[in-house]
Amino acid sequence: MTSDGSVRIAVDAMGGEGAPGVEVEGALAAVRESEGRLKAVLVGRQDRLEAELTKHEHSGLQISIEHADEVITMDESPATAIRRKRGASIVVASRLHAEGEVDGLVSAGNTGAVVASSLFGLGMLPNVRRPAIASMFPTVDRPSVVLDVGASIDSRPSDLLTFAAMGDAYARYVLGRSEPGVGLMNIGEEATKGSELTQAAYKLLQASGLNFVGNIEGRSFLQGKADVVATDGFVGNVMLKLVEGVLDLLMNALRSPGHHEDFEMLKSQFDYAEYGGAPLLGVNGVVIIAHGSSSPKAIKNAVKVAAKFVDTDLAGKIVERLSEVSVTHG
Amino acid sequence: MTSDGSVRIAVDAMGGEGAPGVEVEGALAAVRESEGRLKAVLVGRQDRLEAELTKHEHSGLQISIEHADEVITMDESPATAIRRKRGASIVVASRLHAEGEVDGLVSAGNTGAVVASSLFGLGMLPNVRRPAIASMFPTVDRPSVVLDVGASIDSRPSDLLTFAAMGDAYARYVLGRSEPGVGLMNIGEEATKGSELTQAAYKLLQASGLNFVGNIEGRSFLQGKADVVATDGFVGNVMLKLVEGVLDLLMNALRSPGHHEDFEMLKSQFDYAEYGGAPLLGVNGVVIIAHGSSSPKAIKNAVKVAAKFVDTDLAGKIVERLSEVSVTHG
């Protein structure tokens, strides 16, 4: 935070599908609505960002540009790209964050590149071996947090315990849920069910001191049986894209107009624009991953979410929570 | 098959949630509609099955009872239950099949027990290390077959290749699809994406001679990009229950009556009653797993599907297909 108490968020302005127009419009809206509490740093091609800014009234708004002359595209290999393109917008944004020039960052770019540059630039929190992307899913009751949905694959049991503890902190301090129920994604409800990974993770969770509510199946998950659901990034990513896909499919199937209020309400529970993206937890900083096809509203909300994470010191809360559950990486 | 050419299907009449009434009614309907081509053997408590039969007109129908005095319930541990309850209906049905008294079996009981008793009673086909349950999923185009959805977990890459080859045979000879596209469930489209398991399986599939269409993500899956999708039983089971759950959730959300024709049509693509259950592939026999909450119609269709598998000699076709793709279990 700056000395005047405002929160500084870097916005990777070149990453998303509608870049840089969507990012500039969204960042401006977040700053405008913050009434002086928020400062945005647009990271990207100076000339293009200046041209975008002239399209909007922005006098008096705390907004600046940090030049970055390269862009990592959606189809590039993340690890290779962040090594080769040291001037890419997401790499520059991560560096600004690492150097303390900003308090958090938002990107709608290549998810793998956001994860890789965050790991490289910011490093991990103590006791975290692998990071996790936390995503909200709709349920009949209230949304559940699933993590990881794609930052880490081939997890160890202790990684799932770490994800559970990070999700617990997120549910408490960002979503405001007291004593959040923490579940383990599995293919049966009994303790003995599942893969080698989930069977071992079950034992760790049971002994963790978290409010462990046991195994969660695909169906009970949607009944809202847990506030937080821990899973390997492979399974979580399949779940995320499958639910997105089913909702899309149904939106197309339900062609008759005017009778979809309930459905729309359900879909909005899953709407990135409402949530403003998914946090990357476990890194030593505040990183919000917005959807590649984000609208200006989604970017605006992502910037606000980043600011909220800074305000609540979520990373600090995660470190506390992890020290309480004593993770040992086998 | 019997000498008169009729196909004999054992129906585990005690397994499902509505047993034995649902099973008896469904089996009778299948035999009635087959016009002499089908013979059903109801397996379960003789007294209860005779009582059920008296409720229906069944003179002249080829239906018989095989007594089994125990039942494996939904919450029993499959491996333990099939060892301890040698007189359980599913165990007796598997034994009838193994001894050649019937040509196939249908059960709506404890899925794990059906898998375990099939493995134990029938054994595996040559070159199959682990069996797979194949389930139909709705897509925008036509349903896709996903396997495995829960018979096998902690798969090896060669198991996924086996699943793909078995799914190919199923799509060709049961669904009538020529040159079915075979995909690999993964979390990215590029060959290098995914877990250790999927990366290794990708290479095997690429060299397999199957019509491999590459990696399938949750979203592209629902666009109907592949006729057959191979995945580990853990991921497949999460997918199955999640899609079931989302469709249930939406059925409840869409309360306004009369405007759901399109949605209903989509849901029917996923309806066990229409498909008559999911085949257990890889075992040396014909085993159809019906949903625990099957209706009589679902049981009827499951019996018909079992008969179709016998007619097409799907097990033989799977053996042929596997010999063509040369699976080596690492």
Image (spheres, coloured by chain):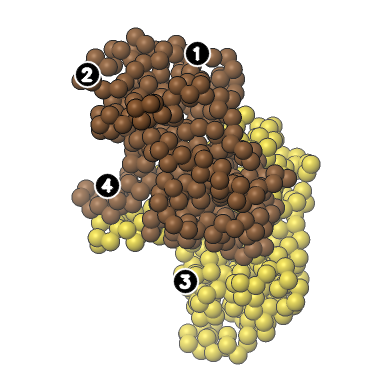
Chain colours: A brown, B yellow
- Cα–Cα gap, marks 3 and 4: 30 Å
Position of B27 relative to A309 (above/below): below
- Cα–Cα gap, marks 2 and 4: 44 Å
Residue A115, image x and y in percent? Answer: 54, 30
Query: Which amino acid is tagged 2?
Result: Ser
The residue carrying mark 2 is A59
The residue carrying mark 1 is A87
Query: Which amino acid is tagged 1?
Result: Gly
- Location of the C terminus of chain B by quadrant is top right
Query: Which amino acid is tagged 4?
Result: Arg
Circle 2 or circle 3, nearest the eye: 2
Residue B299, image x and y in percent? Answer: 52, 70
| Lower position in the chain sequence, tag 2 or tag 1 | 2
Circle 3 or circle 1, nearest the eye: 1
The residue carrying mark 3 is B295
Circle 3 or circle 4, nearest the eye: 4
Could you tell me if the residues under marks 2 and 1 are in contact, i.e. CB atoms within 8 Å? no
The residue carrying mark 4 is A255
Chain letter of the residue carrying label 4? A
Identify the residue shown where x is 51% and y is 51%.
A168
For label 3, the crowd category at 10 Å Cα-Cα, with few meaning under 14, some 14 to 19 and many 20 or more, is: many
Position of B243 relative to B141 (above/below): below
Residue B151, image x and y in percent? Answer: 65, 57
Query: Which amino acid is tagged 3?
Result: Ser
Tally of numbered discs: 4
| Lower position in the chain sequence, tag 1 or tag 4 | 1
